[in-house]
Image (spheres, rainbow, N blue to C red):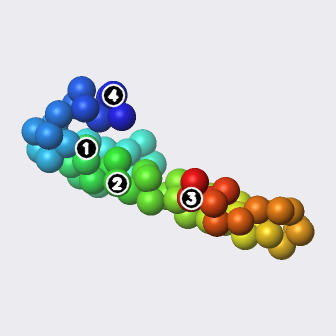
Amino acid sequence: LRMIDQAGESDLDNRMTVAPWAPSVSLPLGRHLLLMIQHLERHKSQLFYYLKLQGKGVDTADLWG
């Protein structure tokens, strides 16, 4: 959160960046951060369901705090 704050609203909205896996796609820094968070959220959900199927004692409070 400190680094996002340090980047500032202007850079989040206007600084164009590329990801190493898609060098031909240029997006604003803030959009790349949003996509990264969505990606991690998917993996978190996958892990949650994997653990549930394994019979582990997890519930939604473990998933979302």
Which amino acid type corresponds to the residue marked 3 in the rendered image? Trp
Q: Which residue is drawn at 32% across and 50% down?
A: 32
Label 3 vs label 2: CA separation? 17 Å
Looking at the rendered image, the disc whose residue lies closer to the viewer, 1 or 3, is 3
24 vs 40, nearest the viewer: 40
Residue at 38% over, 56% down: 35
User: How far from the left and from the top, in percent, is residue 19?
Assistant: 37, 45
Give yes or no for contact between labels 1 and 4 (Cβ–Cβ under 8 Å). no
Between marks 1 and 4 in the image, the one whose residue lies nearer the viewer: 4
**First reached walking from the N terminus: tag 2 or tag 1:** 1
Q: In which quarter of the image is the C terminus?
A: bottom right
Horizontal side, residue 35 vs residue 43: left or right: left
Tell me if residue 56 comes above or below residue 3 in the rendering: below
Which tag is nearer the camera, tag 4 or tag 3? Answer: 3
Dot placed on the residue nearer the N-terminal end, 3 or 2:
2
Location of mark 4 (residue): 2
The circle drawn on residue 39 is none
In this rendered view, identify the residue nearer to me: 18 or 57.
Answer: 57
- The secondary element bearing badge 2 is classed as helix
- The location of residue 15, given as percent across then percent down, is 16, 40
